[in-house]
Image (cartoon, rainbow, N blue to C red):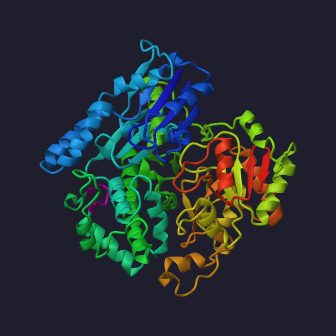
Amino acid sequence: MYILGISAYYHDAAAVLLKDGELIAAVQEERFSRIKNDASFPIEAIRYCLNVANISPKELTAIAFYDKPFLKFERILETFLAVAPKGFLPFITMMPVWLKEKLFLKSILKRELQKIGDFDWTNTKLLFTEHHLSHAASTFFTSPFQEAAIITIDGVGEWATTSISYGKENQITVLKEIQFPHSLGLLYSSFTYFLGFKVNSGEYKVMGLAPYAARESEEVQKFYQLIKANLITIQDDGSYSLQMKNFTFHHSLTMLNAKRWESIFNVKRRRENEDLTLTHASIAQALQLITEEILFGLSRQAASLTGSKNICLSGGVALNCVANGRLERASIFDDVFVQPAAGDAGGALGAALASHYIFFDKEWVANNNFSPYVGHEIDALELEQLCVGKERCTSFNDEPTMMQHIAQELAQGKVVGWVQGRMEWGPRALGNRSILASPLSAEMQQKLNQKIKRREDFRPFAPVVIEEDASEYFEMKKPSPWMMFTFPLAQQQRKKRPISFEQYAIADKLKSTLSTMPAITHVDFSARVQTVNFHQNQKLYLLLQAFKKETNCSVLVNTSFNVRGEPIVMTAQQAFDCFTSTEIDILVIDNKVFTK
């Protein structure tokens, strides 16, 4: 039985294919179109999925879409009616798109799918899954749990913005919901806009900015109280409501009234290219405190409602690895699971899984078999052609020799583009489309940000570490294979910060060497850790072992193989083009090593 899952038309369009419930292919459309966060119909992603299975469209048992367009349209209409005459401009802007593209989605899906090949619509079911059910299914049915509480937090689906559910065997039951316009995701996006970042893609920058301000600082606490007094009311159980008079996203094309927010915080809204200050970081940190307060309250309520010792998180807010890490260490639950594509792309996976287990009533047996390495595989012929006529392309037939060679180059401060096997699923590189570097260099973070990634200096880099060595470097007791949690650096790896460090400007904090591994240590001694074992990612594990032999360090910098504004590279040619246009020193694709 083949089930195709699709997300599209809002952001992060993707396609997923299940075979008898097993995930065999998953990829975002942006990887093909090269348009960051591409929302268009994922026609190339669907073609890829069908090619992996070597099946024709007629062989699909079902096609599942990740939300219900009529319910979403109902919410939009009711919202416009409730705020009328406000919202006339966005109303007349959105309605033609809805009437032409989004409302009659069944017909549109059939038309788009017909471009791929002939479908047998008498035998292929077309299913629509509620948005939050898609999110919940994407995390529960990939978790190692037979039963678990599930929290979904995002901007908005049809009506729900936050939900608590309970997953047991092959059923998911919704227990509590918070509905639009009250949304933690939209609150977070409003601050993303206020701080000068792009909504729906810059939220992780706000998360990365927050640690430049100390949580307990007077300014952070002031902004925290201002948010609670003017923007959001939070109950002990994590339920909340926004003070809508200070938001405009429900009746406007912008998130908020900038002048009103400037009056509340006594801070000018930052423009995209303006310098970041400690005050901006304090606002971001206050928002992080609000996010965690809500997540912790919801988690305690979920534990009470379900009695479960396990929790699964989903939705765009579940990509907040700082909050995830703090929840994991809070011990409200014994175990916390987050699927690596927690945002809207993951909705395609959830729609397919919900269809398989719930609609078709298949048995769910919890396991640890989930793997995100289900994307595009390197084309051997394309790779061979890349090597033709290039003197600086070396083929290694002996894997240990290649690993030793690359480890030696990394130890000498070289930056390596690392492309192996099938691409990872989700927004974060997990060692198959990565840029790798030594964490030991004090200059490496700046080099990677300025000369290779071409992104903001303040953004930190994540470490990848051999699983069995992780506790030597980080305060963590469990593996973190998908880079969905932050953990504190182990005390023995830290260096003493200057007495006046908290008053340093952001640029000066960046210059400070805070640990034995400065390239992966954020200013609050935290790191978004990926652990690796031999079974999970054999080649990355072997490279880490080789690097350990060279340096006595089991950690590497692991960042996504792309530059600012572009999706992660997918093909050998894309990797080679990025290699030649940046200051990456070495490119490794399978067993081919390119140098400059």
- Position of residue 72 in the picture relative to residue 427 (left or right): left
Vertical arrangement, residue 338 with respect to residue 476, above or below: above
What residue span does the magenta drawing correspond to? 232-241
Residue at x 42%, y 44% (from the top left corner)? 11
Does 388 sit left or right of 309 as displayed? right
Single out the residue that lies furthest toward the top: 122
Look at the image and say whether residue 446 sits in the magenta stretch.
no
Q: Quadrant of the C terminus?
A: bottom right
Residue found farthest to the front: 389
User: How many circles with numbers are drawn on the protein?
Assistant: 0
Q: Which residue lies at the image location 63% right of the left edge and 77% below the top edge?
A: 513
Q: Nearer the viewer, residue 202 or 342?
A: 202
Percent x, y of residue 490: 64, 69
Question: Considering only vertical position in the picture, is 99 above or below 528?
Answer: above
Quadrant of the frame with the N terminus: top right
User: How far across and how far down the image is residue 520, in percent?
Assistant: 63, 66
- The answer to which of 507 and 273 lies nearer the viewer is 273
Residue found 47% across the figure and 23% down from its top = 115
Q: Position of residue 25 (x, y in %)?
A: 58, 33
Q: Residue 136: x and y, percent?
A: 43, 40
